[in-house]
Amino acid sequence: MRFVLLWTTNNTAMRRALSIIVMLFFIIHCSLAQQSKKKDDVPPLVDPVTNCQLRYYYFPNIEAYFDAHKNIYYYKEDSEWITADEIPDGYRGYSLYNGVYVYITDYDDDLITQFINIHKKKYPYTKKGNRDIFTKADK
């Protein structure tokens, strides 16, 4: 009741102070509501042996890469490397649901496509989708 009486009186200093407090509360509330955890705030996974970030996936059945840092795919089309947000539908018969992939643990720079010949030999793909490539890489 006392607050209502103070507000209704003609005390301009009290009105200004209260207005400033209300505005500050509103500004602080809005700024805290807009803060969110950014993707960059999360530290990347690092391979303990090679000390490289686990950044790339290699898909042996389509000889393509996925860059988890940039969220893009690298694949060949007419012998040219293409970057895209997703693999085109039906690309070499690939399906994300039954695809085989391998983490690249020994490289975390930007030019992963230069190692395609090494990765084709190191992680061969069989028509059965054999996952022996995981055990071969670990030995």
Image: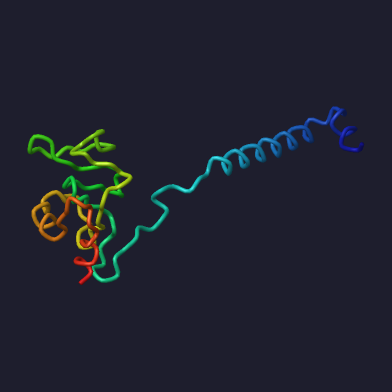
Task: Please indicate whether residue 3 sits to the left or right of residue 66 in the image.
Answer: right
Q: Position of residue 90 (x, y in %)?
A: 23, 34
Quarter of the image containing the N terminus? top right
Q: Position of residue 101 (x, y in %)?
A: 25, 53
Report which quarter residue 82 is drawn in. Answer: top left
Residue in the foreground of this view, choosing between 132 and 9? 132
Report which quarter residue 105 is drawn in. Answer: bottom left
Write the residue at 58% across / 41% down: 33
Write the residue at 7% across / 38% down: 79
Q: Position of residue 54 (x, y in %)?
A: 29, 58
Indicate how the structure is coloured in the image: rainbow
Residue in the foreground of this view, choosing between 73 and 100? 100
Q: Residue furthest right?
A: 1
Q: How many marks?
A: 0
Residue in the foreground of this view, choosing between 96 and 81? 96
Residue in the foreground of this view, choosing between 101 and 65? 101
Task: Please indicate whether residue 83 sits to the left or right of residue 117 in the image.
Answer: right
Report which quarter residue 80 is drawn in. Answer: top left
Write the residue at 19% across / 48% down: 61
Task: Please indicate whether residue 74 sits to the left or right of residue 24 in the image.
Answer: left
Q: Position of residue 115 (x, y in %)?
A: 12, 54
Write the residue at 20% across / 66% down: 137
Task: Please indicate whether residue 8 sits to the left or right of residue 107 in the image.
Answer: right
Quarter of the image containing the C terminus? bottom left
